[in-house]
Image: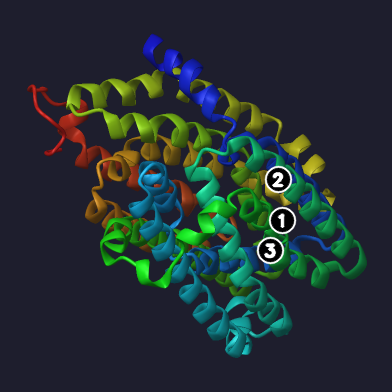
Amino acid sequence: MRKFFDYINTEVIHKAASLNTANISIKIIAGILISKFIAVFIGPEGMALIGNLRNFLSAVQSIAIAGLYKGVVKYIGKFKNNVTELGKTLSTVFYLGFFCSMLLALLIYYNAEFINGLIFQGNYKYTYVIEVLAIVLPFYALNMFVFSIMNGFSKYKILFIINIIGQILGLLVTILLIWQDNIDGALIAVVITPALNLLITVVGILYRKNLMHLIKITDFSFSILNLLSPYMIMAIASSIAMPIVLIIIRNYLIAEIGLKEAGYWQAMNRVSDYYLMFINSLMVLYILPRFAEINTKKEFRREVFSFYKTIMPVFGVILLLIYFSRSVLVNVLFTEDFRPVQELFGYQILGDFMRVLSMVIAYQFLAKKMFAHFIVLEIFLFVFIYFSSVYFIDIYGLQGAVMAHCLSYFMHFAIILLIFGSSLFGILPDEGLDNN
């Protein structure tokens, strides 16, 4: 336990300047304000439609950058003192990202009507929103490219400042568009606010302009692409599948129960996202790098149970406070029309607790590059969530969606315990983590 907090004090506080974690509070505040405006000006029905568009945008953004972000940050940090390898990395990522984002933008633009039918089930005509999304998508990809360069060079302070500006600008634009055009404004805001962070790209290019001469088409490297490919596969598998599953489940709720009820479910997911941001950030900062550096099952077991003993009880207490104050939270975050959301907190919170329990151990897949295990388990989770949601929704209605969420992550945790059973509960010889 002491080692854990020593690490937190020396490493995590230092890394907290990273854009991925230091701006969490800003993101949550902005998200709460946006949720409130959606609730007041649009209502539960609009919340459901916006949820579908957000999920679709999340998926296409991952495809647009080919799932490269985490791998790019790692290898830029690794090669930053090796001009030759750095040039190959930057060139490979830039041209691959450019090709993927432009191809995807064209596909989305010329199939906007078809995609509108998939996202909104043909009941609503927001084809123009999909077309706007296609137009701004390459700007998002370029933004993330420069973002990853600066993150790889540990330029956390300037990234943090620029991102604060981007968050505030995005918040103001979103509120203005919702106030003027209600649901149409909200949907447009969803697709253009990520591109508003082009400010990061512009400043980033000026700040690291000495790197631009390293980007050459002739330095495109298949060896670098091979190094990045596992991260690409894992990122795309997890970043695409879950949003698509959520869209399918939400559309099923709309078809079987109603648009308003689907909005209640989306509101519950929004609340869940807020409190999970903090725990996710902590795991990225501590668990992933720590697992990457340990080499024995004994150390792995010690770290897992240390996290369970120190962090999970605190997280559990926070979840209990959220549950018992759910009436106040719903009133603050949304409006009286969202009062039925209170009934969804129980199973959602329990499922999120199980989700964090499993995520702590599952980071070992990433740390030790157990890509096959990761992908198979992710596929199982997505399939199980979908079928269990359909089953429970048919029986219990809206409550069935959160019941399926809870059961799915319970099963996910159980399978992870089976995979790492010997490492966590078996007799530990002096050996590495090759066998679980």
The type of residue carrying mark 2 is Ile
Q: Is residue 12 above or below residue 250?
A: above
Question: On the image, which quarter does residue 297 sit in?
Answer: top left
Question: Horizontal and vertical percent for residue 390?
Answer: 47, 66
Kindly report which numbered mark, 1 or 3, lies closer to the viewer in this rendering: 1
Report which residue position mark 1 lands on. 199
SS class, disc 3: helix
Lower position in the chain sequence, tag 2 or tag 3 = 2
Q: Quadrant of the N terminus?
A: top left
Instruction: Determine whether, in the image, residue 376 is placed left or right of residue 62.
Output: left
Instruction: Determine whether, in the image, residue 160 is placed left or right of residue 405.
Output: right
Report which residue position mark 2 lands on. 162
Question: Horizontal and vertical percent for residue 142?
Answer: 58, 64
| In-front residue for pair 296/217 | 217
Disc 1 packing (10 Å; few <14; some 14–19; many ≥20): some
Instruction: Determine whether, in the image, residue 116 is placed left or right of residue 231.
Output: right
Assess whether mark 1 and mark 2 are in contact (beta carbons under 8 angstroms). yes
Question: On the image, which quarter does residue 136 sit in?
Answer: bottom right
Lower position in the chain sequence, tag 2 or tag 1 = 2
The residues bearing labels 2 and 3 have C-alpha atoms spaced at a distance of 14 Å
Question: Horizontal and vertical percent for residue 345?
Answer: 61, 42
The residues bearing labels 1 and 3 have C-alpha atoms spaced at a distance of 9 Å
What residue lies at 21% left-to-right and 40% top-to-bottom?
Answer: 418
Q: Which mark is residue 195?
A: 3
